[in-house]
Amino acid sequence: MASAFSLEISEPGIGVLYFDLPGEKVNKFSTPVMEELAGHIEEMKARHDLKVLLLMSKKPGIFIAGADVKEIASIADEQTGYEVGRKGQKIFTEFEKLPFPKVAVIDGACMGGGTELSLCCDFRLASDNPRTKIALPEVTLGILPGWGGTQRLPRLIGLQKALDVILTGRTLSAKQALRYRLVDKLIAAEWLQEKALEFAHEVLAGKTQRYLERRKIRGAANVFLEKTAIGRSIVFSQARKSVLKKTHGHYPAPLKALEVIEKTADFPLEEGLKKEAKALGELMATPISKHLVQIFFWTEEIKKENGLKDTAITGNTVQRAGVLGAGVMGGGIAQLLASRSIFVRVKDINYEAVARAYQQAAYVLGSKVKKHRLSRMEFNQIMNRITGTTDYTGFPSTNLVVEAIVEDLDLKKKVLAELEGHVNEQTIIASNTSSLRINDMAEALQRKENFVGMHFFNPVHRMPLVEVVRGQHTSDIAVATVFNLAKKLGKTPILVNDGPGFLVNRLLLPYMVEAISLLEEGNRIEDIDRAIFNFGMPMGPIELFDEVGIDVAYKVAKILRQSMNDRMADSDLLPKLLEAGRLGKKSGLGFYKYEGRKKVQDPKIKHFISIKAHYKLNEAELVQRMIYPMINEAARCLDEGLVAKARDVDVGMIFGTGFAPFRGGLLKFADTEGIGRIVAKLADFSDRYGSRFKPAESLLKIKEQGSFYRN
């Protein structure tokens, strides 16, 4: 194996240890790389010409991406996990003990083990490169920082800030890392080498006291919380409440990390490291960690894809875009495009409507300014990329236009036909429709090959999924253009062939309608929502109706019923609620009543619910009644070729609906449950509650194969 590290003497007394992993786009720690680092450490111990060491990367935009996740995935037992932790800790500790000051020069992504190695340095510099991000994201993989992160970070930046970083896995910008005292100084990326050497000379001259001074805990309240037993107990108590509120106890990693930090708060470093490694081994062996690691691999796979078998097709570069429809979705899409340096032209029927797009964009960006994730200058730069119009001026120069008007087929066809006359022959036209078929809308166009679906989920700035929908006539260029654009926008795209509701809504609507059936069988709203919430979904199906809007859900349900009537229960509840003006959260009344941001039970809702039968179910049966039909429908989707593989179903459900990641996704959950058990239960439900539960032929085939993930 070619060397990953190289040591150069830049100036007398100043060495630079470069990390540049051969054949890889990123620097990461594998077993061979760690062993090579250990060898360099031994060599440096014996050198007398080193007075200061700079740790740097030769890869643009990357410092160190962390450990090789493939090795994490391969660890199946606690003891092996413990040994991996201890080995990494010992190498990093030896680096920390080198008899001269060490300076981490962070330019680009610094994640996990990279951050932990930087903590073994005496000082940390961070460049102002926008790609400079620092994090300990291990909890997102179901583990904890196991190479010293739980021990060194609290010692460096204090308990409160360390818990915020470790328990959330949040990513800090260079400026945030400076505020957290995780880095000592920001330097210009353009003069990285020069500024790093200047700092090295400061270290040689002993002019570092001001950097050490700014690390001190300040303020009486902080001193109390950080330095006293009572104060620390308060910090740990609040942190535990925060973790449970966010994870609901489904994810053991943050709680285990908290436990380790709390129990080792007064331990010597070496004793704390042993506890950390033991906890790492325990977490590595859990099914939850394996599921979260698998999701990581899926997202990494998608980053290398373009939605086509021919990965050489890159599609068109989008520098100028248009958005038709200036509502909440249109404004959100415009903001997202402008945030990625794309100039956006927003059109609606009048300037009052256009103004709403500006308001939505400003609202999203303003919240980032308040949280210090965006500067006021950056806010202005992004907003200046958005312009509005009531005609088609500016549209002929667009590379792509996203249509985001109301869900009305005839209106969409009329607008799309009009739009086509105002764009150039290469412009890709993408519809953000959530339920209407791409093939039906394409009838209005002459250049059908340029038309594709680009279904964002609401709210656009938060939901990570984009369904790229291929119609009968959609070209490879159109697919690749939109797929790659979605990745540029920071989204996770999946390719879906055209069909009613595409993938996510097709699976979600029967689940939601089944929840109404359960209401009409005498089950309480709070019991239904609690069962699904406890299962691991971000909210229950009844609350979800209110969240998306009962009017929107009803419209989508009517469209899907045309092709799925035999798989969806009949009910007149939604139209009754609409007639009463109950639209959900946006109107303040739906299934629940909303008092500001607070959701409360509404006793009046019972007057709208007609009890058709009495089947009082326990929590497990409630979950099965709603989740198993989604699995049944997913088998049909795969059999029809709506999506290419089980992975796309699980990615779609996780990133489009929040389906419990700790369960690995809908179909990973199905495999865990056992396909035979699911088929038997659906057959039982079919006998008891109606033929809509009948196991699909495609699910029976999966049963014979034994697994959705048989390959």
Image (spheres, rainbow, N blue to C red):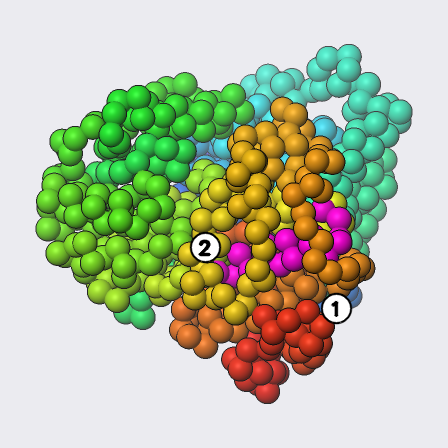
Q: Is residue 170 above or below residue 232?
A: below
Percent across and percent down for residue 460 are 44, 40
- The overriding secondary structure of the stretch rendered in magenta is helix
Residue topped by disc 1: 77
- Viewer-proximal residue among 131 and 88: 131
Judge depth for marks 2 and 1 and give the one in front: 2
Circles 2 and 1 in contact, beta carbons < 8 Å: no
Q: Is residue 381 above or below residue 193?
A: above
Q: Point out residue 274 in the picture as x, y percentages from the top left corner.
A: 80, 51
Between disc 2 and disc 1, whose residue precedes?
1
Q: Residue at x 21, y 27 (%)?
A: 389
Residue 671 visible here? no
Q: Residue at x 13, y 51 (%)?
A: 426
Task: Point out residue 502 in the picture as x, y percentages from the top left corner.
Answer: 41, 60
- For label 1, the crowd category at 10 Å Cα-Cα, with few meaning under 14, some 14 to 19 and many 20 or more, is some
Residue type at the position of mark 2: Lys
State the residue at coordinates (64%, 63%): 627
Residue 591 visible, this orientation: yes
Q: Which residue is mark 2?
A: 558
Residue segment shown in magenta: 506-525
Is 521 part of what is drawn in magenta? yes
